[in-house]
Image (spheres, rainbow, N blue to C red):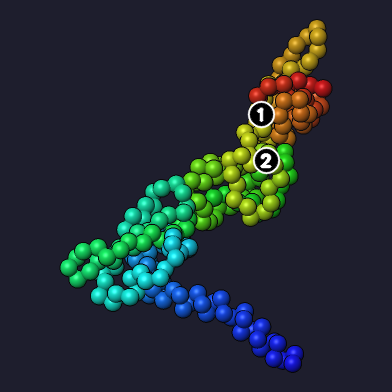
Amino acid sequence: MRKILLVILCIFLSLPAQAFEAANPYWLNLKPKLLDYLRRSMNRNSYTYEVVGPTRELENFLGNRQDANIKFNRLNLSSPSHRKTVIATAYGPSGAIIETLPIVVNVWVYHDVFMLKQSIAKGEEVAEENFYRKRIAIRELDRKLYFDDNVHQKVATVNIPANTGIKKSMLRHQRMVQIGDMIKVTSGSKFINLEFMCKAMSSGDVADTININCPDMKPSNKKAEIVAAGKAKLI
């Protein structure tokens, strides 16, 4: 009895798929023609796609007319939405239109984006050896969201996992003082305000304490607090 129930259950589960195939022979005839059209009309180095399907139930479209001449049009690759519509039009022997059918296709554009080799935390800089470029498929309308400038020494505004496409919102400006910058450093004295040109040995923003090297001072290695872009005071 248990075996019989299992057989009945298997038959029941297979019915929806069989019913779909049986009810859609016209779509099965149309889809290969659509795929051929997409392969011929789209540069696969620039785009990738996925056929979603017809916008309405198919009962008797195209496949029941073996003499129908099928053409596809209205695939607008420049539209910002990744969900696009292809219009399938069936023409009779006389050239008259038999019927039209909108078909939905998801299209993504390939775009080179910056990615991290290793994850960084919010507030950390992007090191020169920690990023690379990779071509990925994105929505056309998202193209401007991704960082397209040099990401070296930019600062993370959020935690960024490795191998994640870096968007503009994930990074902010470089720190006001970068390692190796020559900056103006004041003595900070209330009575005598001396100014020196020193080399930044670490990076930072306003109010950050950094290591500096000042050849005109003894000892030359000091600490200073950043007060503005390219400026600091000894502490």
- The residue beneath circle 2 is 156
Q: Locate residue 2, reporting x and y percent.
A: 75, 90
* Residue drawn at the location 77% of the way across and 17% of the way down: 187
Residue 189 visible in the picture: yes
The tag on residue 176 is 1
* Type of the residue with mark 1: Met
Location of residue 185 in the rendering, given as x and y in whole percent from the top left corner:
72, 21
Q: Residue at x 51, y 77 (%)?
A: 19
Q: Considering the numbered disc 2 on the image, is that residue within a helix, a strand or a loop?
A: strand
Q: In this view, does 83 lie to the left or right of 41?
A: right
State the residue lying farthest toward the front.
1
Report the Cα–Cα distance between label 2 and label 1: 14 Å
Q: In this rendered view, identify the residue nearer to me: 194 or 190.
A: 190
Camera-nearest residue between 189 and 63: 63
Whether 42 is drawn above or below 79: the answer is: below
Which is more toward the observer, 116 or 214? Answer: 116
Quadrant containing the C terminus in the rendered view: top right
Quadrant of the frame with the N terminus: bottom right
Q: Nearer the viewer, residue 171 or 61?
A: 61
